[in-house]
Image: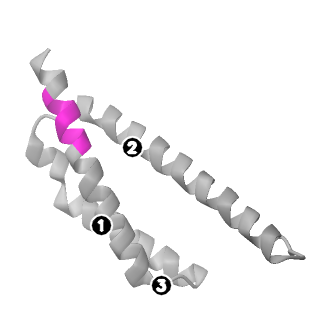
Amino acid sequence: MKNCNSLQEIREEIDSIDEQILELIAKRKDYVKQAAKFKHSVEEIKADERVSQVINNMRHKALSLGVSPNLVTEIYTKMIDDMVETEIAQFRNTKSL
């Protein structure tokens, strides 16, 4: 981590991190959309067991990094819910072609 010398410099670093986070979310969403072509049903897309596995893995990782696991759970739950809807739409579009 960079040792900043001003509040402005800290804000610039935070802004840079925020941009990276958004780029990674977009990349994740692209992979989720791609996954739709390997699935055979909406139920397979919803994959409750996989969702639990991802959230549990991220909770453990959060703890090891000193980040609130509850915050990570909220973020991942919202993100996964949104991406599941995207994947379902992609799946239906692919199957209707």
Marked residue nearer the N-terminal end (1 or 3): 3
Q: Where residue 68 is drawn, which disc sits there?
A: 3
Q: Is residue 20 visible?
A: yes
Q: Is residue 1 visible?
A: no
Furthest toward the top, the residue is 97
SS type, badge 3: loop
Marks 3 and 2 close (CB-CB < 8 Å): no
Q: How would you rate the neighbour count of disc 1 (Cα within 10 Å): few for under 14, some for 14-19, many for 20 or more? A: some
Q: Is residue 71 left or right of residue 6?
A: left
Report how far apart the C-alphas of labels 3 and 2 lie in the structure.
24 Å
Marked residue nearer the N-terminal end (1 or 2): 2
SS type, badge 2: helix
Q: How would you rate the neighbour count of disc 2 (Cα within 10 Å): few for under 14, some for 14-19, many for 20 or more? A: some
Q: Is residue 75 above or below residue 15?
A: below
Say which amino acid is labelled 3: Ser
Say which amino acid is labelled 2: Lys
SS type, badge 1: helix
Q: Where residue 67 is drawn, which disc sits there?
A: none
Question: Which quadrant: the N terminus?
Answer: bottom right
Report how far apart the C-alphas of labels 1 and 2 lie in the structure.
14 Å
Say which amino acid is labelled 1: Thr
For the point 34% across and 58% down, which residue is it?
79
Q: Main secondary structure of the magenta part?
A: helix
Task: Residue 26 in the image: state x and y as whole percent.
Answer: 46, 44
Q: Quadrant of residue 70?
A: bottom left
- The boundaries of the magenta stretch are 86-92
State the residue in front, 19 or 66.
19
Q: How would you rate the neighbour count of disc 3 (Cα within 10 Å): few for under 14, some for 14-19, many for 20 or more? A: few
For the point 23% across and 49% down, which residue is it?
84
Return the residue at label 2: 29
